[in-house]
Amino acid sequence: AMEAANKGACEAGGMSVGLGIELPFEQGMNEWVDLGINFRYFFARKTMFVKYAQGFIVLPGGFGTLDELFEAMTLVQTQKVTSFPIVLIGTEFWAPLWEWVRGSLLANGMIAGKDLDLVHLVDDPAEAVRLVQADTASHRSPR
């Protein structure tokens, strides 16, 4: 997925940035990365992810994906970063987690109803891009 995102950025004429992490089982940067930075610690890598983000489009993934997703949601929720849209692609994959969020976190008062509005679930990649672009266009102020 990351290689596809980097390749797409290159083919569209954009800057392809890769934020790697030093792990014994990771493959390293792919050939489509124009600007690559490797991190030793997850917290430093996540800081870079959110510091300059204009949106998060999240594909199905494992613990690392969930870690980055919930970090981004928490930072937007607590207004520690400038608000940006968070879009989850693949409703079949994400719906059970989101139902748990509603049924456990919201139902028990651990999050507010407005916190659910931080995230969009979609199946169409074009819709994900549209949501990020629409939000970016409505917030054209400097960071």
Image (cartoon, rainbow, N blue to C red):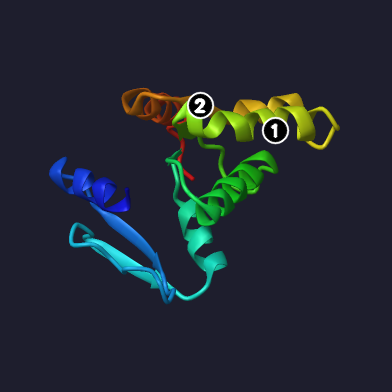
Q: Which residue matches tag 1?
A: 100
Q: Secondary structure at mark 2?
A: strand
Question: Residue at label 2?
Answer: 121
Q: Position of residue 107 (x, y in %)?
A: 82, 27
Q: Is residue 71 left or right of residue 45?
A: right
Front residue (pair 143, 121): 121
Q: Where does residue 50 sit, x and y in percent of width and height?
A: 51, 51
What amino acid is labelled 2 in the image?
Leu
Residue at the right extreme, as displayed: 108
Q: In which quarter of the view is residue 96 placed?
A: top right
Question: Crowding near pointer 1: few (<14 within 10 Å), some, many (20+)?
Answer: few
The local crowd at label 2, few if under 14, some if 14 to 19, many if 20 or more residues have their Cα within 10 Å, is many
The disc at residue 25 is none
At 54% across and 52% down in the image, what residue appears?
68
Residue 21 position within the rendered picture, expressed as x and y whole percent measured from the top left: 43, 69
Q: Which residue shows up at 62% across the image and 35% down it?
A: 97
Which residue is at 44% across, 74% downward? Answer: 23
Task: Say left or right for 112 vs 63.
Answer: right
Amino acid type of the residue that numbered disc 1 sits on in the rendered structure: Trp
Q: Quadrant of residue 33?
A: bottom left
Give me the C-alpha separation between circle 1 and circle 2: 14 Å
Q: Is residue 140 above or below residue 71?
A: above
Residue at image location 70% in from the left, 33% down from the top: 100
